[in-house]
Amino acid sequence: MTRLNAEISAICVLLLLSKSLLATASNGDRTQFFHNCRQNCERTNCSADGLEIQEQAISFYGQTIFDRIFGWSCADECSYGCMWRTVFAFLERGWPIPQFYGKWPFLRLFGMQEPASVIFSILNFVMHLRMLRKFRWTVRPDSPCYKLAHIFSLVCMNGWIWSAIFHTRDFPLTELMDYAFAYSIVLCTLYCMVMRMLHRYSLFLRGVITLAFVSYYINYFAYLSVGKFNYSFNMKVNIGTGVLSAVGWFVWCHQVRYRRPYYRRILRFYVLFALAMGLELLDFPPILWVLDAHSLWHLATVPLVSLYYDFMVEDCQTLRKEQAMAEAYPYYNKDI
């Protein structure tokens, strides 16, 4: 306790020495207290050579099998331990809870850095899988847009897998894959909207548009992979793509509102999704050190998945009936 009290006193002195540090007190990783704590910990526990000594250093933190599986090294343990020392020191002084490397402090659970986001990402994956099975049970394979629904489902499940991986362990590679495949979901919704509107057009035209979408995504993936990651630009691209998709569906809903009453499903999906996105605008310390705004957004998207699939089911069934009518009666008035 004496050593902890000394460290708490040290942070007061170190932070008050600099106005810049005081102005950015919410950034815990920038404080001298955090740096000193981590350096001392690594020098004491992680600087020795030899696997046996390293294993002893790691066991000092009482690692579980999950911590070892997810690669928590001795240096990582020092950073994690010093993060909480810094947090408690801030709380002792009545200062705002600091962030570390752009993130709030989260309580590690079963080796997962952000356990709530991991769990809710897995729930989204499971929901997509269940709804895809429901789609396959209720929609005939020869229905229009049948394959389109599968493309959407597979892209979404892949994105949520990488979301769970990234929130389990934040590495540069897992971060890249999470952001890149998250955008693939957004872009896929735009692609599905365009292909749904053009489903009666020639295979050649749809093939050209598909190639254009794939080429664009490959180039964007390459852009994210090279150089420093631009978070603000990536957010703007995601928002812009999502807005294009929503506007396309809203125009479609307006045009078919008297002929296709199930348009309300896709309309309701986008309205509720926009409301759920509002959680991303919030920024508050994790509740119980586990639940933050981002994880709650992941949770909010889980029940919305069924709305999108219910729309696809009814739309594909309707298009299948219209296709059968058109084959039986050549002059049948085709709808969009």
Image (tube, helix red, strand yellow):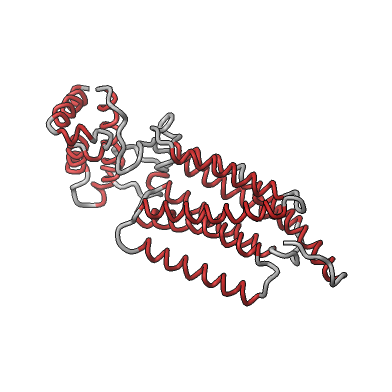
Q: Is 149 above or below relative to 38?
A: below
Q: Residue at x 18, y 42 (%)?
A: 39
Q: Nearer the viewer, residue 25 or 195?
A: 195
Q: Residue at x 37, y 49 (%)?
A: 170
Q: Quadrant of the C terminus?
A: bottom right
Q: Quadrant of the N terminus?
A: top left
Residue 249, image x, y percentages = 62, 54
Q: Residue at x 36, y 50 (%)?
A: 71
Farthest residue toward the bottom?
204
Q: Nearer the viewer, residue 273 or 91?
A: 273
Left or right: where does residue 33 sit relative to residue 244?
left
Left or right: where does residue 78 sit relative to residue 135?
left
Q: Is 124 above or below relative to 99?
A: below
Left or right: where does residue 47 sit relative to residue 61?
left
Residue 95, image x, y percentages = 27, 26
Q: Nearer the viewer, residue 325 or 141?
A: 325
